[in-house]
Amino acid sequence: MKALIIGGTGTISSAVVRRLLEKKWEVYVINRGTKPLPEGVISIIADMNDEQLVAEKIRGMIFDVVCEFIGFVLAQVERDYRLFAGKTNQYIYISSASAYHKPASNYLITEGTSLANPYWQYARDKIACEEFLMKMYREHGFPVTIVRPSHTYDEKNIPLGVHGKNGFWQVIKRIQAEKPVIIQGDGTSLWTLTFNADFAVGFVGLMANPHAVGEAFHITADESLSWNQIYETIAQALGVKLHPYHVASEFLNSVGPGYDYEGSLTGDKSVSVVFDNSKLKRAVPEFKPVVCFAEGVRIALDYVLAHPECQKDDPEFDRWCDKVIDALERAKAEFK
């Protein structure tokens, strides 16, 4: 079986590539060639935004499955349709669980949950991409499958709610130093975290699967944790006491310019979500997530603490956290 992976080096797609190699697929990866690929992958170096060059690179090639991991806006999937219509038996588009209706009318999410997110342009763009692709399926038989990941992480990433532009590391430093750590809301909303190796089992199981064409699936772990539990689990793995500081998401968005907390919090992480994976499990019986967050975060922390290149300081975000906390403490003092 021959697969073309568009991207191939991200948190999700790298795990999919490894899984495909284990399953003895013939794996082609198309990207700009800036990051190394596993042995056995056939590299096609091209910028997907250069449609003419990509068309030349894949001329005469037919794929069993094409997987789009870096399509974020409508123009990109329209381009893919032009490139791959008639050249693949299945086109899998990575959408996002953030596309599901916000605010949710029910905490339990199925693939039938409506798609609407007035708070986050990223999610609205994903919805537009889905709508176009399903239209091409209905009207022209384009063999599309939609996959909606939720919060997926790997050994190089620690999943968090509130962080700065440089990612998770500054928050880890605050936890290690036992400084107050900002958690959105009261920390009781439920969230789902999926280790990328588990995700890859579900994803690869949908590839060349006749039950998947024309369908949408989300792929997530079955474990749901509150944000308080998530941060507490991280602190326990670090061997320190957590000092949570709860702040309303609306307030964080109003005082955090440049961090897009309206999208990432109000439009996503502040909303309780529990995913019903029964549709995926019917199509892919082998999908059984095995990495719980307590194990996954220890894997990630062990890796990050041993690799300085993953430790990106963010003094601006650190000062911002202190400023937010100080301002709220002074406001509290006014009422004493």
Image (cartoon, helix red, strand yellow):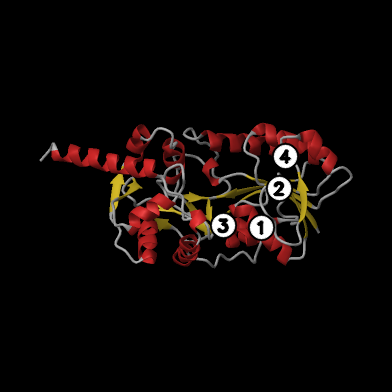
Secondary structure of the residue carrying tag 3 is loop
Tell me which numbered mark, 4 or 2, is placed earlier along the sequence.
2
Q: CA distance from mark 4 to mark 2?
A: 9 Å
Tell me which numbered mark, 1 or 3, is placed earlier along the sequence.
1
Is the C-beta separation of discs 1 and 2 under 8 Å? no
Tell me which numbered mark, 1 or 2, is placed earlier along the sequence.
1
Tell me which numbered mark, 1 or 4, is placed earlier along the sequence.
1
Quarter of the figure that contains the C terminus: top left
The mark lying in front, picked from 1 and 2, is 2
Instruction: Assess disc 4: are there few (<14), some (14-19) or many (≥20) residues with their C-alpha within 10 Å of its C-alpha.
Output: some
* Residue 247 found in image quarter: top left
Residue ID for mark 3: 277
- Can see residue 279? yes
**Residue type pointed to by label 4:** Asp
Secondary structure of the residue carrying tag 2 is loop
Q: CA distance from mark 3 to mark 2?
A: 35 Å
Secondary structure of the residue carrying tag 4 is loop
Q: Where residue 58 sits: x, y (%)? A: 83, 44
Q: Where residue 74 sits: x, y (%)? A: 66, 33
Viewer-nearest residue: 226 or 313: 313
At 69% from the left edge and 35% from the top edge, which residue is drawn?
76
Q: Where residue 203 sits: x, y (%)? A: 65, 56
The mark lying in front, picked from 3 and 2, is 2
Tell me which numbered mark, 3 or 4, is placed earlier along the sequence.
4
Q: Check residue 33 in the rendering and tell me which mark sits there, or answer none.
A: 2
